Image (cartoon, grey):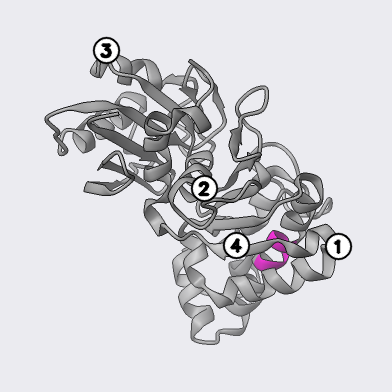
Amino acid sequence: MTGSVLAIDVGGTKMAAALVEPGGRIAAYERIATPRPPHADADGLWRTVLTLIDKLSAERLAGVGVGCGGPMNWPSGKVSPLNIPAWRGFPLRERLQERFPGLPVRLHNDAVAVAVGEHWRGAGRGRDGMLGMVVSTGVGGGLILGGRLVDGVSGNAGHIGHVIVDHEGPACECGGRGCLEAIARGPGLAAWAREQGWPGETGKELADDAARGHPIAVRAMNRAGWALGVAIASATHLCDLEVVAIGGGLSQAGPLLFRPLEETLRAHARMEFARQVRVVPAALGQTAGLVGAAAFVLAADRYWTAD
C-alpha cells in the first residue's frame, strides 16, 4: 500500500494526529488538549478535531485510522466516550468519511489501537497472545490472540477496565462498582488520595509526589498497581497471554506503578502457564495509539475485519 495514513487519537485528556508511513514511522505529529465542559459541546469538539487534522497534509493518503475512547457502536463509529460527556452517539466515523470521501476510514477503541500498535511495531511484535492497555483518564484494553485482533461481538473484547477487582470498591462511571477503571484511572486515584489527606489535584501531580516519597501518594500508586495486578492475573488465566503492554499517562510513573503491579500479579497468577506472562511499558510510548490506528489501514489483514 502506498501513501501515508492520517491517524487520530481521541482521548479524555488530549487529541493527537499524525501522518504514519507504510512501515509504521510517524512522519508528522500534532496534539491539543481535549476541550472540557463547559467549554465544548459536540460540534465544538468536532471543530477541534478538524483544526488538529488540518495542521497535517500529505500528497497522498491511503486512508484514515482512528482510536477513540469508548464505549462506541462498532464498526459504525458512533462514539460515546465516558470521559468526553459532550459526545453521546456522535457519528465520528461518518463525519470523517464526509471529510475524506473515497478513502477508507476505520475507527476503533483507543485502547484497541494501543494494543494493535504495540503488536504491530512494539512490545508485542511477533507474539501470538497479547493484551495492550491504556491507564490514563480511563483504563481500557485490546486483545490479540492467534496473532490477530479479537474484536468481540460489539468491538469491545479486551476491555479490561471494567473487570471487577473489588466488589466493595468505588462506584464506576459505567454504573458498576469496583471496576479496575474506578480504582486505577488517574482522576479516580487522585480523588482517593485527596480523601486520605493528599493536597494535590491531578494524577500527574500524584505520581510526581510519589516519586518524592510522599506517603499518601506512594500508597495511591501501590493501590493502582494492586488493582492492575489482580485484573491482569485474571485476564492471563482466561486468555493465556504472553505479553501485557501498558501505555497511557499513569504508566509513565515507572517502578512506582510496575513494582506493586508485578508483586500482585505474581501472587495471583499461580497456574504454571500464567507465570510466563510479561508486563512491560508500551514500547511506542504515547504514540502507540496512533501507530495502531494507522495499522487498521496499513495492516488490515490482521487488524481490521469490519469491511
Visible residue check, residue 16: yes
**What residue do we see at 39% from left, 20% from top?**
93
Q: Position of residue 13 (x, y in %)?
A: 40, 49
Q: Position of residue 290 (x, y in %)?
A: 37, 43
Q: Position of residue 182 (x, y in %)?
A: 66, 51
Q: Position of residue 124 (x, y in %)?
A: 54, 53
**What residue do we see at 46% from left, 55% from top?**
122
The disc, 2 or 4, on the residue closer to the chain's N-terminal end is 2
| SS label for mark 2 | helix
Instruction: Sort mark 1 into few (<14), some (14-19) or many (20+) by Cα contacts within 10 Å.
Output: few
Residue 189 marker: 4
The disc, 2 or 1, on the residue closer to the chain's N-terminal end is 2
| SS label for mark 3 | loop
Circle 3 residue: 102
Q: Which residues are magenta?
A: 225-229
Q: Of the residues shown, which amino acid type is indicated by label 2? A: His
The disc, 2 or 3, on the residue closer to the chain's N-terminal end is 3
Cα–Cα gap, marks 2 and 4: 28 Å
Judged left or right of residue 272, residue 215 is left
